[in-house]
Amino acid sequence: MRRALAARAGRLARTPLVRLLAVGGVSTGLYLALASAGEARLGLPAAAASIGAYAGAAVFSYVAHRGFTFRTTRPHRETAWRFSVLTAAGWAAALAIPLVLTEGLGAPPLASFLAVAIAIPAANALALSRLVFARALTTPHTR
């Protein structure tokens, strides 16, 4: 029984879904750290801190998702522009959410950063797998 569970866990760990969650978690953590530091340490408005942090985290996200999560060999000319369009949409949301929450509703900056950190990765997961790198999330990858 123990071996069967260990074998199943090993197969699960090889799936792009688990790798997506790991890279997404690190990307989101990076975004939160950069956004919080930009607002608290540099004195940036929440929206400026958010979009700056989003841009920084996007670079890590592309490299890690392309090479580790999806392990694609598709050329950058295919994947990079798709990722850029997705990132532009996410960047717009990373600007709009803090503006609405902090400026419009008076929420603290951290609340707006958390809203970005929840909403955008959820949408990105589907878009990355179906539009950018086009590989099913549940297919084990043996390399």
Image (spheres, rainbow, N blue to C red):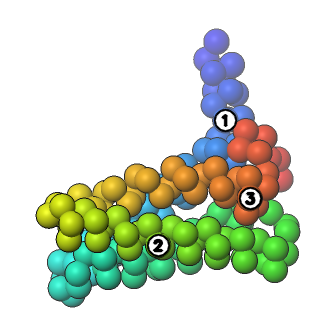
Query: Residue 120 location, x and y as percent?
Result: 48, 58
Tell me if 34 is positioned left or right of 37 in this view.
right
Which type of secondary structure does the marked residue at label 2 adopt? helix
Q: Which residue is mark 3?
A: 131
Give how far apart the Cα atoms at labels 1 and 2 are: 34 Å
Residue at 44%, 67% (x, y): give it. Answer: 93
Query: Residue 71 location, x and y as percent?
Result: 76, 60
Identified by mark 2, the residue type is Ala
Query: Residue 3 location, x and y as percent?
Result: 67, 20
Residue at 65%, 63% (x, y): give it. Answer: 65
Which type of secondary structure does the marked residue at label 1 adopt? helix
Asked whether residue 69 appears in the rendered view, the answer is: no
Asked whether residue 126 appears in the rendered view, the answer is: yes
| Front position among marks 1 and 2 | 2
Identified by mark 3, the residue type is Leu
Identified by mark 1, the residue type is Leu
Residue at 64%, 50% (x, y): give it. Answer: 126
Label 1 crowd bin: few (<14), some (14–19), many (20+), radius 10 Å: some
Give how far apart the Cα atoms at labels 3 and 2 are: 19 Å
| Front position among marks 3 and 2 | 2
Where residue 105 sits, quadrant-wise, is bottom left
Q: Which numbered circle lies on residue 12?
A: 1
Which quadrant: the N terminus? Answer: top right
Q: Which residue is mark 2?
A: 92
Mark 3 / mark 2, whichever is N-terminal: 2
Q: Which numbered circle lies on residue 132?
A: none
- Mark 3 and mark 1 in contact (Cβ < 8 Å)? no
Return the residue nearer the eye: 92 or 131. Answer: 92
Residue at 47%, 72% (x, y): give it. Answer: 92
Q: Is residue 120 above or below residue 102?
A: above
